[in-house]
Image (tube, rainbow, N blue to C red):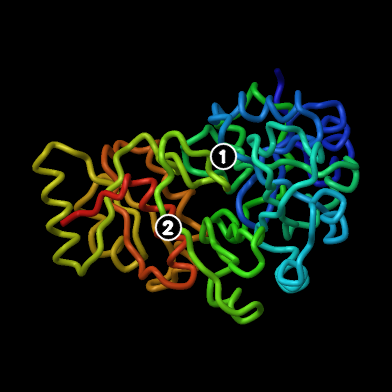
Amino acid sequence: MKTIIYRPSEVLKAALKLQQGELISFPTETVYGLGADATNEVAVKKVYSAKGRPSDNPLIVHVSAIEEVEQYVVEVSEVASKLMETFWPGPLTLIFKVKEQAFAPTATAGLDSVAMRMPDNALTLQLIRETGKPLVGPSANTSGKPSPTTAEHVFHDLKGKIAGVLDDGETGVGLESTVLDVTDPARPTILRPGATTKEALEKIIGTVYVDRHLISSDEVPKAPGMKYKHYSPNEAVVIVDGNHEMWQKAIETYQKQGEKVGLLAEQAIVDHFQKNVSATYSLGEDKSVKDAARLLYSGLRYFEKTTATVILAQAYAENGLGEAYMNRLKKAAGNHFFE
């Protein structure tokens, strides 16, 4: 299959492919998604095949307007309405009880709930409207690898497996959306942290809970990103949380083991150690977790172009956006910290 890179002016061509049951990757403010008609079972199954994704991992359904949600879910609670009015379009996914046969069975992984969001990207909202159907949209990468934040990342992973990529440049947030379960409005629960933080949610609806339990091998996750090792490059990733002495010790430890060290860290650390290591990638301004979140996946992907065999990656405080950043980094590293 030939994979076409569609320019923004070619959104109608991309929508036609989706109507024909083909797969099109689309841009969002978070990462690039892999789109298919959410009501077409054959098309949705193609998504799992293209990604190599386990079929018990549910998909997020993307809509172009808040009003569309009522067509597909059992109830839109007052809590859900407040959240959609406040945060949509944006990086917040809500889990609702789903109406029977509203979507392709594979899209919900056989659950009685569905994850839905309205992305903050005008081009993709137009794509959904032109297609005339909501779109599933897991990250457009090989399953388990770092999510794509550019069309080039998608093309690298899925060339020949999908019909095309709608290119709208680099994404702005860089990490997947927050997933919030509102099936019980009295106990809204974060299943996956993202750019819409717990603190921001609580300003609108009061107490928000966080589900941090580990999904067992025989349990079906309610949201993407809960079960498997995710976001991992080919190189080993080790998290470093400490001062320059800790970084120096980590570099020397792995070099003594014969490893070629890559650094994924803020600019000051890169500047200090770049002459001592094989490769570096800057996570942006010092102490800026917003920069780090936006650049994390690009950084993890960068090192496959280098000689690095191990990536030493910087930890950030686990609050606000830092919780989402560390959630992804710990999965990329298999929770391996340098100690």
- Label 2 crowd bin: few (<14), some (14–19), many (20+), radius 10 Å: few
Q: CA distance from mark 1 to mark 2?
A: 30 Å
Write the residue at 53% across / 30% down.
54
Q: In the picture, which quadrant includes the C terminus?
A: bottom left
Out of 131 and 200, give the one closest to the viewer. Answer: 200
Residue under circle 2?
Answer: 212
160 or 38: nearer the viewer: 38
Compared to residue 298, the image places residue 325 above or below, namely below
Give residue 51's mark: none
Residue 202 in picture, x, y percent from top left: 58, 78
Rendered residue at 42%/57% (across/down): 212
Amino acid, disc 1: His
Nearer the observer: mark 1 or 2; the answer is 2
Return the mark for residue 153: 1
- Quarter location, residue 111: top right
Instruction: Name which residue type carries label 2.
Output: Arg
Q: In the picture provided, is 39 more to the left or to the right than 215?
A: right
Tell me, yes or no, whether the two marked residues, 1 and 2, touch with CB atoms within 8 Å.
no
Report the front residue among 324 and 204. 204
Is 76 situated left or right of 230 in this image? right
Is residue 85 depicted above or below 218 in this figure? below
Q: Please determine whether, in this image, residue 289 is positioned above or below residue 335.
A: below
Residue 312, image x and y in percent? 27, 51
Q: Examine the rendering and report whether any part of residue 154 can be seen.
A: yes
